[in-house]
Image: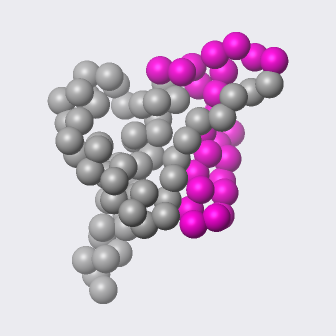
């Protein structure tokens, strides 16, 4: 899992990945689990196609996981665009 230190070292890369994904209709966000304090899941909305993760996270972990997913999608989509 992405660490806070790693995120801080490469913040611009993660922010660029976030911007790229949002510009292409991909949103990653956390949702709360009812009746559970500080327990979140992560969901990816890819132009209306929603996929919910199976793991649960604390607030801090969810925030870092979201940026980790944005970077993964950014790299995957960038490679697809480069091949075309």
- Identify the residue at the far bottom of this view: 84
- Identify the residue at the far right of this view: 35
Provide residue 60's location: percent of width, then percent of height: 47, 20
The colouring scheme, among rainbow, by chain, secondary structure or one colour, is one colour
29 w.r.t. 37: above or below: below
Taking the image as shown, residue 66 lies to the left or right of residue 13, namely right
The residue at 47%/39% (across/down) is 66
The residue at 42%/66% (across/down) is 24
Provide residue 68's location: percent of width, then percent of height: 40, 41
Can residue 54 be found in the magenta stretch? yes
Can see residue 74?
A: no
The residue at 18%/30% (across/down) is 9
Taking the image as shown, residue 75 lies to the left or right of residue 55, namely left
Quarter-of-image position of residue 58: top right
Which quarter of the rendered picture does the C terminus lie within?
bottom left
The magenta region covers 35-60
Count of labels in the image: 0
The residue at 49%/24% (across/down) is 61
Can see residue 81?
A: yes
Quarter-of-image position of residue 22: bottom left
Provide residue 42's location: percent of width, then percent of height: 60, 39
């Amino acid at each position: 899992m992405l660490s806070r230190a790693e995120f801080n070292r490469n913040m611009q890369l993660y922010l660029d990945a976030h911007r790229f994904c949002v510009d292409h209709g991909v949103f990653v966000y956390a949702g709360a689990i009812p009746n559970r304090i500080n327990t979140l899941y992560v969901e990816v909305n890819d132009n209306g196609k929603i996929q919910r993760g199976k793991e649960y996270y604390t607030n801090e972990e969810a925030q870092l996981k979201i940026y980790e997913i944005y970077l993964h999608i950014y790299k995957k989509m960038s490679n697809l665009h480069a091949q075309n």
